[in-house]
Image (spheres, grey):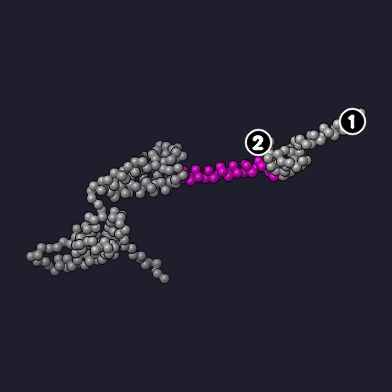
Amino acid sequence: MASENSFVQPSIPRFDGHYDHWSMLMENFLRSKDYWSLVETGIAEPAIETVLTEAQIKTLEDQKLKDLKTKNYLFQAIDRTILETILKKDTSKDIWDSMKKNYKGTARVKRALLQALRKEFEILHMKEGESVNDYIARTLSNANKMRIQGEKLEEVAVVEKIIHSMSRKFYYVVCSIEESNDIDSLSIDALQSSLLVHEQRMTNYVVEEQALKVTTHEGTTFSGRGRGGFRGRGRGRGRHLSYNQGAQFNKERVECYHCHKLGHYQYECPDKEKETKVNFGEIEGEIL
């Protein structure tokens, strides 16, 4: 079992074809090892005729040893097929500069990509049904891509973009946030927290409203034979709505207990009315 004090070494970022993302991760990795200066400036090689002191010789040897370690990290991060395309691999700076030249792209390509990202950022808006977390993550992803391409995008610009592109159901929330906060000093994290609170309240309100509708519907319906909210003559099978609720009820499933047909109650039965008239005529004839 590993001890509690054991430290997990960070993994070396593998190059996957996305240079901007990989270079950011790799730079951070090499800085954590205190090797980035060798990639950025290279080894300070003295002139051939320069006589070095013992301290200078030791410093130069230490730099070369660190450079070898840095090259080792780069070799592990870059696939063999890509390394074979790099002609000069004497130092870590040579490898890094070659990767930057081959995969970062020209200035023209960068400008075209940045222009596309700017357009995407301008038309960005929250979709109906999209959550606050998903939309803010999508906005920040676009903003970070622009920054990688050299765009100087301030946090306040991202905050304003999020506020002014929320869906319609957040309009009153946005107005409240703008009135109660200074947008210039409002952070993205604070904005996200505020929007999440309102989103949770709206979700709870919808759930409670749906539960209330179901409860009300169940309270106005019942199953039985001529008993419950409906009071009237005759008996029938089916579900009835109470007259107290003022609701219309479909009698298509109601069975008459006289003729056993559907669509009416016993007291409304047309066959019963006919039988009553016949019986009355027979009685009247006997009297006469």
Q: In this orientation, does residue 272 appear?
A: yes
Magenta: main secondary structure equals: helix
Left or right of 21, for residue 280: right
Left or right of 31, for residue 209: right
Left or right of 119, for residue 239: right
Residue 1 point in image, percent of width and height: 42, 71
Q: 167 or 10, which lies in front?
A: 167
Q: Quadrant of residue 85?
A: bottom left
Whether residue 12 is in magenta: the answer is no
Q: Cα distance, mark 2 to mark 1?
A: 43 Å
Seen at 39% across and 42% down, the residue is 125
Seen at 24% across and 58% down, the residue is 99
Kindly identify which numbered label has been placed on residue 259: none
Seen at 22% across and 66% down, the residue is 68
Which residue reaches farthest bottom? 1
Q: Name the residue type under label 2.
A: Gln
Q: Name the residue type under label 1.
A: Gly
Kindly identify which numbered label has been placed on residue 248: 2
**35 to 195, vertically: above or below:** below
The magenta segment is 195-223
Q: Quadrant of residue 73?
A: bottom left
| Dot 2: element | loop
The residue that label 1 is drawn on is: 285
Q: Label 1: few (<14), some or many (≥20) within 10 Å? A: few
Residue 250 point in image, percent of width and height: 66, 38
Q: Considering the image in quadrants, where does the C terminus appear?
A: top right
| Dot 1: element | helix
